[in-house]
C-alpha cells in the first residue's frame, strides 16, 4: 500500500485527503492519503521517510512550503523560482520538490476564460501563495503586476524574486483588469477588506484565492459592481490534479462530483 501525506500546521481543515482518496479509489490505485500535523523540527524526518520509500509522496501546506526546501535534494525550476514547494516525491533516489500551485492557478484562470495575457494585474497580499501566482502570471504574459500589502516590506521582498513588480501602498487602488485577493481576509464570513472598490467599474475579474467560504465579501462586492468573479476552488483542485498526475502518472477526472466533494459552505 502506497502512502501519501499532506503536512502543515494547522492541518485539520485540509481537504486534500478527501480529494486524493476519491481519485485513488476511482483509479483503483492501492494507496492511502492522510493529513499530518508537523512542526518545523520534524520536516527532515518526513524527507528521510520519503528517501527510504516509506512514504511515496507529500503535499506541503502553510507554513512549511519554504521551510522544507533545505532538506530537499532537487527543486523543479518552478519551486526554485518561487522558493515554494507543495509537492514532493522520490525520483531515482533523489527527493524532488515541485510547486503545483503555479499550474493550479494557471489552469483555474484558463477555466474562467478571463486570460491573463496582456492584462494589468493587481494583487492584494504578499503571503505564501503570492510567489506562485506571480510566476504563473508572468508565464501567461500579463502586461503588468502590481502588489499591495499591509506590511509593505513583505511586498518589497518579492522584488528580490521577481523583476518588474510594482509595489503600491496599502489603501490605494490602481487601474487593473484582474484583481486577486491573496490575503487571509475573508476566511471568516464577516471579514471585509478595508479598501474602497466603488470606483473600479465593471467587466473586470475579481479572483479570490479563498474557497471556503465560497463567496467572500470581496467577491460579493465585485459581483455587485458588474464584474466576473472566481473563488480559489479550482486552483485548489488543479494543484491537487497536478500532484496526482506527477505521483500516479494518471490524469484524474474533474467532474461536478469532484467539485461537490469540497463544497462545504
Ligand atoms: P504568511 O504571511 O504567513 O504567508 P498568509 O496567510 O499567506 O500568511 O498571508 C496573509 C496575508 O494576508 C498577508 O499578506 C497579510 O498581510 P501582512 O503581511 O501585512 O500581515 C494579509 N492580511 C491578513 N490580515 C490582514 C488585514 N486585516 N489587513 C490587511 N492585510 C491582511
Image (tube, rainbow, N blue to C red):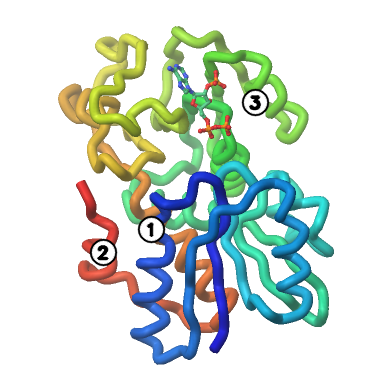
Residue 49 lies, in percent from the top left, at 72, 72
Residue 246 lies, in percent from the top left, at 59, 74
Q: How many marks?
A: 3
Q: Which residue is mark 3?
A: 165
Q: Which residue is mark 2?
A: 261
Q: Earlier in the sequence, mark 3 or mark 2?
A: 3
In this picture, residue 219 sits left or right of residue 136: left
Could you say whether the residue bearing mark 3 is in a helix, strand or loop?
Answer: strand
Mark 1 → mark 3, Cα distance in angstroms:
32 Å
In this picture, residue 135 sits left or right of residue 44: left
Mark 1 → mark 2, Cα distance in angstroms:
9 Å
Tell me the number on the disc at residue 15: 1
Vertical side of 177 occupied by 210: above or below: below
Mark 3 → mark 2, Cα distance in angstroms:
37 Å
Quarter of the image where one finds residue 214: top left
Which of the image's four quarters has the N terminus? bottom right
Select label 1 or label 3 by which is in front: 1
Residue visible at 68% across and 16% down in the picture: 153
The answer to whether residue 102 is seen in the rendering is: no
Residue visible at 50% across and 11% down in the picture: 170
Amino acid at each position: 500500500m502506497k502512502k501519501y501525506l499532506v503536512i502543515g500546521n494547522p492541518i485539520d481543515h485540509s481537504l486534500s485527503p478527501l480529494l486524493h482518496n476519491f481519485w485513488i479509489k476511482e483509479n483503483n490505485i492501492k494507496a492511502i492519503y492522510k493529513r499530518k500535523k508537523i512542526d518545523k523540527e520534524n520536516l527532515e524526518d518526513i524527507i528521510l521517510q520519503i528517501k527510504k520509500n516509506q512514504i511515496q509522496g507529500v503535499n506541503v501546506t502553510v507554513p512549511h512550503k519554504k521551510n522544507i526546501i533545505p532538506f530537499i535534494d532537487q527543486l523543479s525550476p518552478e519551486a526554485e523560482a518561487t522558493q515554494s514547494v507543495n509537492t514532493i516525491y522520490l525520483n531515482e533516489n533523489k527527493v524532488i520538490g515541485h510547486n503545483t500551485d503555479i499550474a493550479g492557478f494557471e489552469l483555474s484562470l484558463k477555466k474562467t476564460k478571463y486570460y491573463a495575457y496582456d492584462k494589468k494585474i493587481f494583487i492584494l497580499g504578499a503571503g505564501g501563495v503570492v510567489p506562485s501566482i506571480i510566476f504563473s502570471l508572468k508565464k501567461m504574459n500579463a502586461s503588468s503586476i502590481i502588489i499591495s500589502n499591509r506590511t509593505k516590506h513583505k511586498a518589497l521582498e518579492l522584488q528580490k524574486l521577481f523583476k518588474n513588480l510594482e509595489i503600491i501602498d496599502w489603501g490605494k487602488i490602481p487601474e487593473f483588469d484582474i484583481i486577486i485577493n491573496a490575503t487571509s481576509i475573508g476566511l471568516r464570513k464577516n471579514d471585509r477588506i478595508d479598501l474602497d472598490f466603488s470606483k473600479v467599474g465593471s467587466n473586470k475579474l475579481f479572483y479570490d484565492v479563498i474557497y471556503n467560504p465560497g463567496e467572500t465579501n470581496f467577491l460579493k462586492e465585485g459581483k455587485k459592481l458588474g464584474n466576473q468573479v472566481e473563488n480559489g476552488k479550482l486552483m485548489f483542485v488543479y494543484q491537487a490534479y497536478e500532484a496526482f498526475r506527477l505521483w500516479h502518472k494518471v490524469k484524474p477526472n474533474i467532474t461536478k462530483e469532484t467539485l461537490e466533494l469540497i463544497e462545504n459552505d
